[in-house]
Image (cartoon, rainbow, N blue to C red):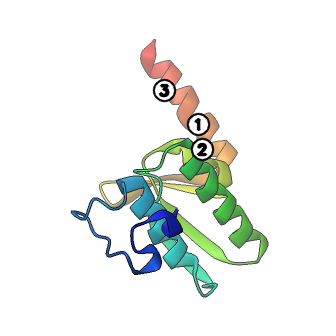
Amino acid sequence: MILRLPEGYDTRIGITSGALSAGQRQRVALARAVYGDPRLLVLDEPNSNLDEAGEEALVATVERMKAEGRTVVLIAHRPNVLACVDEVLVLRGGQTAASGSRQEMLNRFTRAAVEHQR
């Protein structure tokens, strides 16, 4: 993708440059975040602008980092990225509302959503 830009790696990119879409900028930001193999990575809404392929790449990156013994903290509203997490902490108003394994939290909140619809 980068090599197809007008000036390759030297292409200036920014919010208003138009060189990259929001999803592409987000993927570049993720690449920058994992560069240098950090021991701890905190990602805030890392999938907010990603398409399906971008989300798959994000999940694969998080899985790889976990396999290498790194710690990844994801802050997300969209649940698609939960496929790669072990534990979930739900916050409401800055306070802990629930916490547990991914499966436990998915079961709990799915069941609550179904009961709420009745």
Secondary structure at badge 2 equals helix
Q: Residue at x 56, y 42 (%)?
A: 52
Image height of 42 relative to 74, above or below? below
Q: Which residue is mark 1?
A: 108
Find residue 5 and report its image quarter. bottom left
Q: Amino acid at mark 2?
A: Met
The 10 Å Cα crowd at callout 1, few under 14, some 14 to 19, many 20 or more, is: few
Identified at 78% across, 70% down, the residue is: 67
The answer to whether residue 83 of the structure is visible from this angle is yes
Q: Position of residue 75 (x, y in %)?
A: 45, 60
Question: Circle 3 is placed at which residue position?
Answer: 113
Q: Is residue 85 visible?
A: no
Mark 3: amino acid:
Ala
Mark identifier at residue 2: none
Percent coordinates x, y for residue 97 in the rendering: 44, 51
**Residue that protrudes farthest toward the right in the picture:** 67
Cα–Cα span, label 3 and label 2 = 12 Å
